């Protein structure tokens, strides 16, 4: 443990702000073990990645078999059967006319590709994103990221990005109804089109549930209104499902909750149960606006990751994990919201499916110290959770979708006790 920590300090750049004092030795299913053999129930899934659990046997078998055949050749220079199969399957399971996939290695690259497609298709160069949105840490995706903390030390960014209000209730207006929230957010979006851009907006980009923003769920009427406004200004709609995709929110893709058809969808994280892969799925005419070789990636669509994605998807569908996430998420939300009423220090419990946030704060404002303390108490009791939100005061519960109901209920008990202990100091 000590040497690993020392070497991290000496040789690893840019670690997480509040890295957990835990050296991971192995993981399987919903469990992680540290070097001392202690077992943890993983309720963060490697930042919302292993929806099917760690090292799922079907994924491992597919990867092993792929390793025996082909590791790399570049999936854009040669035809790779698994890549063709995954692209076809994504066209089938994504909503509307989304049809062609560009494969990369991460969420940020998936968003970068979406930006390029939108620019090429529309011949326009500007974007509108949400104030509390997050889309990655490359310079292009940081330009779309509203969260000020995440943008520090990276600018100046590409110009031509305007930010619209996030469709959530403001602390300064606690009595706002969801309908009023939507009106204010849509008016802000209109204003962004009218006054903050030159009128050449290529696309609006939104997360259907904001993950890094602190698990923020827009009211149901919001996204259809965004579609309407974007259409009126001739802009495309990019839905960033990097964090919400593959069953996490109780549907295969979160946008299905809203009945909206995007022009481009970005995917990564849960796509391959831990193997690195990003996908940008677009309507054919939009994808085709970039010609051969105009956008490419050396490792993108790596056959091993793609084989993992195929097995992952097959299991998610076979086990109907979106429905399982909806069921377990609803149990947790009801229970936690009830518990929160009696727990000073909990401002709000919110979420969709197995993407749940517990926001902590008091009269002095957000309490990121409570969040870190609660996470530590939970870890000491054998449950791993995340911390997020722009102010760092939101606990993130995003377990593998396969978590058993017994484990999930135990985790909730541990988390409630951890929050109570953190808040009482
Ligand atoms: C919505 C969203 N988009 C993009 C990204 C960036 O993904 P990656 O870290 O794989 O580049 C993230 C990562 O958290 C995300 O949540």
Image: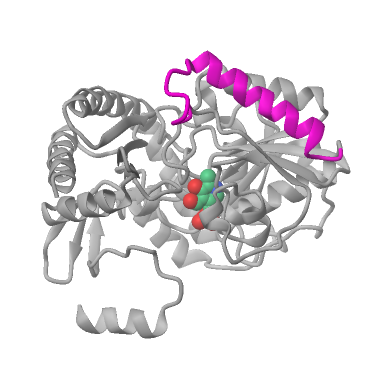
Relative to 265, 353 lies left or right: left
User: Which residue shows up at 47% across the image and 50% down it?
Assistant: 269
- Rendering quarter of residue 129: top right
Is 97 drawn above or below residue 393 in the view shown? above
- Does the magenta portion include 99? no
Is 265 drawn above or below residue 110 in the view shown? above
- Does the magenta portion include 182? yes
Residue 206: percent from left, percent from top? 60, 36
Residue 308: percent from left, percent from top? 45, 53
Residue 324: percent from left, percent from top? 31, 28
User: Which residue shows up at 60% across the image and 43% down it?
Assistant: 266
| Image coloring type | one colour
Most frequent secondary structure within the magenta stretch:
helix
Residue 69: percent from left, percent from top? 50, 65
Q: Residue furthest front?
A: 364
Relative to 356, 65 lies left or right: right
Foreground: 303 or 112?
112
Is 24 drawn above or below residue 101 in the view shown? below
- Rendering quarter of residue 33: bottom left
Foreground: 125 or 319?
125
| Bounds of the magenta segment | 169-198
Foreground: 211 or 68?
211
Residue 235 visible at all: no
Foreground: 349 or 49?
349
């Amino acid at each position: 443990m000590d040497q690993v920590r020392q070497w991290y300090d000496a040789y690893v750049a840019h670690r997480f702000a509040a890295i957990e004092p835990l050296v991971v030795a192995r993981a399987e299913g919903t469990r992680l073990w540290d070097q001392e053999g202690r077992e943890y129930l993983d309720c963060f899934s490697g930042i919302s990645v292993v929806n099917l659990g760690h090292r799922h046997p079907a994924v491992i078998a597919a990867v092993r078999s792929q390793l025996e055949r082909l590791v790399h050749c570049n999936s854009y220079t040669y035809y790779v059967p698994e890549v063709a199969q995954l692209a076809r399957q994504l066209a089938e399971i994504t909503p509307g006319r989304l049809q062609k996939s560009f494969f990369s290695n991460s969420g940020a690259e998936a968003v970068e590709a979406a930006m390029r497609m939108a620019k090429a298709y529309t011949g326009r160069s500007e974007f509108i994103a949400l104030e509390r949105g997050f889309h990655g840490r490359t310079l292009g995706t940081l330009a779309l990221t509203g969260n000020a903390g995440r943008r520090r030390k990276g600018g100046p960014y590409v110009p031509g990005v305007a930010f619209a209000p996030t469709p959530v209730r403001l602390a300064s207006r606690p009595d706002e109804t969801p309908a009023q929230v939507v009106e204010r957010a849509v008016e802000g979006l209109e204003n962004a089109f009218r006054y903050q851009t030159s009128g050449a907006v290529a696309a609006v980009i939104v997360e259907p549930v904001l993950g890094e923003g602190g698990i923020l769920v827009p009211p149901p009427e919001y996204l259809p209104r965004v579609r309407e406004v974007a259409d009126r200004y001739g802009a495309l709609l990019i839905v960033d499902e990097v964090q919400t995709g593959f069953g996490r929110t109780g549907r295969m893709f979160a946008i299905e909750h809203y009945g909206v058809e995007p022009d481009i969808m970005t995917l990564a994280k849960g796509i391959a149960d831990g193997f690195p892969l990003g996908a940008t799925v677009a309507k054919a005419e939009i994808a085709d606006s970039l010609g051969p070789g105009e956008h490419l990636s050396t490792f993108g669509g790596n056959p091993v990751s793609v084989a993992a994605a195929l097995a992952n998807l097959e299991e998610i569908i076979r086990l109907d994990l979106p429905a399982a996430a909806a069921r377990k998420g609803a149990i947790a939300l009801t229970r936690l919201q009830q518990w929160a009423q009696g727990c000073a220090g909990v401002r709000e419990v919110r979420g969709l499916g197995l993407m749940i946030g517990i926001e902590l704060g008091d009269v002095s404002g957000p309490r990121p110290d409570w969040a870190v303390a609660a996470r530590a108490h939970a870890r000491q009791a054998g449950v791993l959770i995340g911390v997020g939100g722009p102010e760092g005061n939101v606990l993130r519960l995003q377990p593998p979708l396969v978590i058993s109901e017994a484990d999930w209920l135990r985790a909730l008990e541990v988390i409630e006790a951890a929050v109570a202990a953190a808040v009482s100091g």
